[in-house]
Every structure is written in C-alpha cells, then in structure tokens.
Image: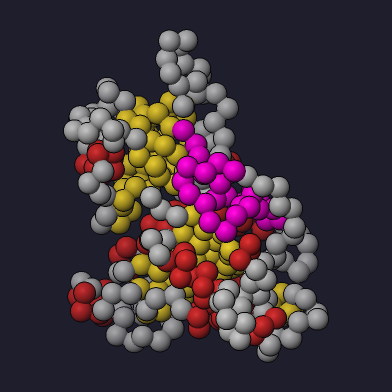
Amino acid sequence: WHRATIKSRKQLSPTVTGLTLKIHETSSPPSATPTNSSFTFLPGQWVDFQPLPTSTSWKPKDSNKTIGGYSITSIPKSLPYIDLAIQSSRHPVAEWVTCHAEVNDLVNLRVGGSFTYANGEKSDASVKATTNDDNVLSNETTTKQRLLFVAGGVGINPLFSMIQQWHVDQRQNDRSPQPRAVLLYSARQEEDLLFVSELNEMVGELNDHFRVVLTTTAPATDYPAGIAASHKNDSVGNPKDSILRNIEYKRGRVDQDMIKDAVRWINMMDNAVLNDERNQEEDDDVIADLVYICGPPGMPEDMQRLLFPSQNDRIRFVQSTDDVHFEKWW
C-alpha cells in the first residue's frame, strides 16, 4: 500500500468526479501499514483506493466495502501525481469520493491489473481477457503499428491513459511509416463523454496519425434540448457549434461498419498500405495489430465477436483473438 493526498477534485461529467492525488515521497513510520516507496504503474492499470478513518465524513456502513478499484487516467511521467475518474454509485467508496471527499484528505492506494500498454512498440497485455484481480504480465515485444482502441462509457479511463502514453511515444518517434491509432468511443449522451478536449488536442498535434470517433447511443429525445439540437443530423461530422474540430461525431453503437472504417484508416501509412503485400480493397487482409477494449459488461465480448467472428466466411479485422485485449469490469 502507498499513502496519497487528494490535491484537487473536479466534476468531469454529471456522474463522474475527477481526482488528482499526490503519492507521498517519504516512507511511513515503521508502525504504519503503507510503505509509500517505489510507486510505479503502467498505462491501463488501476488502483485499490481506501479512504482512511481520518478522512472527511468517511463512515462506511459496510465494513466489507471499504476499498474501491479505479483506473488511473494519467501516465507514469506525471508521478508523483496520478489522476482518477470515479463514477458515482452506491458503493461506499465511490459515494464518499463523489459526495464527501475534500482536498487534503489522505487515502491508501495499491496498484493492480494486467490490462496494460507499455509503449509504442511493446504491449504487456498477454491475454485477450483479464480481470481486475489478475496480475499476470507477459513480455510481448513485436512492433505494433496499427492500434485500435474501443471504449464504452467510463471504460475510457484506462484507455485514456494508454492513448496519452502512445501520444507521447509518437511525438518522440521519427521512424517511417509512423504508427496510426483510432479511438472509437461510445457513451449514452454527449455530456457523458470524458476527456474530449484533451483528445481533440492530441488529434490536432498528431495530424494524420490519430483519429477519434465519438458516438452516442441515446435517442435524441433523451438529450437536453441544447444537446439534442446538435444531433439532428445523424451523419458523420461535428456539431456546428462545436470548437472540437478534430473529432468526428456519429450516432449509434460501435458496429462493424465503424470498425471496418477505422481499421482501413490505420492501415494507411504515409498514403500507402503498411504491408505492401496487402491490398487495401481486400477486407480479409486489412487488420489491426492490437486492439484494446474497455466498457460495460458484455461490450468487450461483443466487440471481439465483431473483430474476429467465429464463422470463416465473415470479415476478420485481427489475425487472432490474441491481438484483442480487454478488461472485464467487476
């Protein structure tokens, strides 16, 4: 365990609270449980999060629910600071964070998870499905140049950390052709989408090598009036009043057509297909090297079936299911 202090909190969406915490750099007294030394993590990992008895208004009704698990949304170079995005719920820890936590409250943190992204050339994700209590890592070192990220709801959290790391890697990358990545990000309503400004900025900086497609699934009648107006046209494009010009907007769930379009795009490197032996017009040969998926229960499995159908006559967008990595929610 490691001790940390809440340095700031802000509302990221109507239901998600963002925290910035600072990991303590000095060791705890010998009598304390946390060690606070050598706090490290890989993009995609989560932390066990435990308020202290001295934390503001921390009075859990259930002694068996004093720890919550939340994905880290920042990257390692930001240490000793880390960011979390916590969705409101009836779980005591989430309720405390969203309703009672204050700046300078102390908490304990413990890193876990094997759903990780190491850097632009290596992935530590060794299995197509992992759970939050699985800490097995691999040493896969194959160069991966075509990446697809698929997020649903707050499943964007670990992927946002991965994408930020990929973004940093690419800005330092001078090899040719440069890798490409696409994020397909789905939420119920536009107001539920997180990190949109940051993603828009990254797309602008990486120009033709990073693409973000946001899609919302709620019927237009479910939107507040101002948001519904921007979705009168269901075709691809940005809301007219939006300043986020680098991002594409769609309606509906992520489907095979969206995946096909995304995978075709990441196969174009400097206006050429990455592998000269592949013909871009042959869907069977247009693939993603790595796919990272995180979303509500059932979504990762659905996406994997779209990416790698069991029927041999269906289009496949990965070489095998080993190239599809996802994390299951509790």
Indicate left or right for 121 with 74 as reference: right
Picture residue at 50% right of the left edge, 39% below the top: 112
Q: Is residue 106 magenta?
A: no
Q: Tell me which corner region of the image, top left, top right, bottom left or bottom right, holds residue 91.
A: top left
Picture residue at 40% right of the left edge, 69% below the top: 186
**Residue 311 location, x and y as percent?**
57, 81
Q: Nearer the viewer, residue 317 or 165?
A: 317
Per the picture, the main secondary structure of the magenta-coloured stretch is loop
Q: Residue furthest top?
A: 30
Q: Tell me which corner region of the image, top left, top right, bottom left or bottom right, holds residue 251.
A: bottom left
Q: Is residue 105 above or below residue 230?
A: above
**Residue 140 location, x and y as percent?**
71, 52
Q: Is residue 198 visible?
A: no
Q: Residue furthest right?
A: 277
Count of labels shown?
Answer: 0
Q: Nearer the viewer, residue 129 or 295?
A: 129
Indicate left or right for 120 with 251 as reference: right
**Residue 215 location, x and y as percent?**
40, 74
Q: How is the image coloured?
A: secondary structure
Indicate left or right for 241 with 287 as reference: left
Magenta range is: 110-136
Q: Tell me which corner region of the image, top left, top right, bottom left or bottom right, holds residue 225.
A: bottom left
Q: Is residue 269 visible?
A: yes
Q: Is residue 178 above or below residue 275?
A: above
Picture residue at 63% right of the left edge, 52% below the top: 126
Q: Nearer the viewer, residue 172 or 215?
A: 215
Q: Residue furthest bottom?
A: 281
**Residue 265 location, x and y as percent?**
62, 78
Picture residue at 41% right of the left edge, 53% below the top: 329
